[in-house]
Image (cartoon, grey):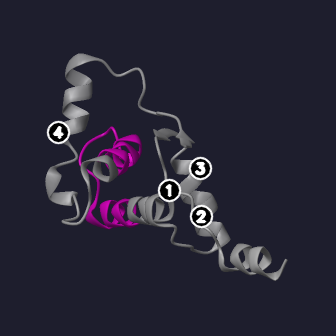
Amino acid sequence: MVGVGRQGAGMVGEEEDEAEAAVPDCFRAYSETEKHWQARRDFLLRHLPTDGTPAAARLDQLLALSMVWANHVFLGCSYSRDLLDKVMDMAEGITVEDTPRFTTRDELMRKYQR
């Protein structure tokens, strides 16, 4: 399980509905399952500026970072240490149940060399 906290926690009622409406389904990738999309959507909701619509460049960067995080968590993709540290910090508090366990090449080699 991957843990991650909600910076936007504390929103209630209409504020929460408005924040969720700010992340339209058009940002969902065609191949994303509902579970993947909801986790990535939570990531996006935590980091959307609260003072209005984000600039296009900022939104593009946020969408890219959300994909990096989701690809790492759900697909086992690897990225530079600095990038992974950044997205994992951004995702702190988000809980994803039943994440896959990936075996690295080095782990496989150790297993079969015994």
Q: Please state the horizontal and vertical placement of residue 104, each as a whole percent of the image.
A: 65, 73
Lower position in the chain sequence, tag 2 or tag 4: 4
**Residue that numbered label 3 is attached to:** 89
Give the tally of numbered discs.
Answer: 4
Q: Which mark is residue 100?
A: 1
Residue type (three-letter) at the residue carrying disc 2:
Leu
Q: Quadrant of the N terminus?
A: top right
Nearer to us in this view, 3 or 99: 99
Local packing at callout 2 (Cα closer than 10 Å; few below 14, some 14-19, many 20+) is: some
Vertical position of residue 47 compared to residue 7: above or below: below
Q: Quadrant of the C terminus?
A: bottom right
Q: Please state the horizontal and vertical placement of residue 45, each as a whole percent of the image.
A: 34, 42
Q: Which mark is residue 31?
A: none
CA gap between label 4 and label 3 equals 24 Å
Image point (49%, 58%), residue name: 73
Lower position in the chain sequence, tag 4 or tag 3: 4
Q: Please state the horizontal and vertical placement of residue 29, each as a whole percent of the image.
A: 23, 64
Magenta region, residue range: 38-64
CA gap between label 1 and label 3 equals 20 Å
Residue type (three-letter) at the residue carrying disc 4:
Ala
**Residue that numbered label 4 is attached to:** 21
